[in-house]
Image: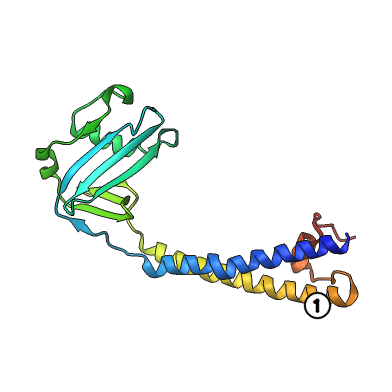
Amino acid sequence: MNTTRHLLNIIFGFTLCLVLVVKVAPLFYVKAKTFKNSIPKIKELKHFSISYPFESDKYINLKLVANSKDTLEKRYYIPDAEHKKLVAFFKTKNNITNDNLKEILPLSFSKKQLDSFSNIQLTSNKKSIQILAINNIFLIGSKPNVFTKGLYYLLSVLFFITGITGLGLLTFVVIIFSKTGQLPNLPNKLKGIKHILKGSKTKKNQ
């Protein structure tokens, strides 16, 4: 493999490791720091409906107005089937058995129905709904898990260590390569790095 190919693979390796250290690891750390075990509750809903957002039967748009009077929305791509729990909730509360969305949409709740809802939990970001639970039924998102926070911290540490280790190995490779013009002989456990840089599959020891 020529020198240019060596350099390109080494640069790619450094870039990947830097992304792990500078971007990926901090991302999971921030997620862990900001993770909340509880979901804020709101007093009431002013509006709650689902409909086709435009002349297309491939999307469903959820529109919700909370007691803050801010309009929140969430759009579903029907083939992904993420809307089914929400649609089932509307159908149950409105005593609808028809499964044909084209025939039953749009759906909404009356003021009397909205007033009957209790224990409304809601989180949003930039007017986009992230978690919505009504009467302890999670319609959007899921109940926060105490282990999720620990998992985020663990992933942060793992990605950081992986990135730092990779940078160290690549630095070692660069030093040897600059002096000899050849990739160093690595221990068996590190041969994967060598073959990534070579751009070839791992060869079996003869």
Name the residue at 9% across, 39% down.
112
With respect to residue 156, does 95 lie above or below? Answer: above
Q: Residues within 10 Å of mark 1 (few under 14, many from 20)?
A: few
Q: Is residue 141 above or below residue 175?
A: above
Q: From the viewer's perspective, is 5 left or right of 23?
A: right
Quarter of the C terminus within the rendering? bottom right
| Front position in the image: 119 or 21 | 21
Mark 1 secondary-structure assignment: helix
The structure's colour scheme is rainbow
- In screen coordinates, is 37 left or right of 180? left
Q: Position of residue 79 (x, y in %)?
A: 44, 33
The reply to whether residue 120 is in sight is yes
Residue in the foreground of this view, choosing between 32 and 59: 59
Residue 137 visible within the image: no
Q: Is residue 170 left or right of residue 111?
A: right
Pick the quarter of the image with the N terminus: bottom right
Residue 106 falls in which quadrant of the image?
top left
**Percent from the top left, x then y, of residue 3?**
86, 64
The residue type indicated by label 1 comes to Ile
State the image coordinates of residue 68 (x, y, percent, origin top left): 18, 54
Residue 19 image-quadrant placement: bottom right
Circle 1 is placed at which residue position?
175
Instruction: Measuring from the top left, give residue 164's x and y in whole percent.
Output: 63, 74
Quadrant hosting residue 188: bottom right
Residue at the image position 10 percent from the left and 44 percent from the top:
115
Q: Nearer the viewer, residue 134 or 145?
A: 134
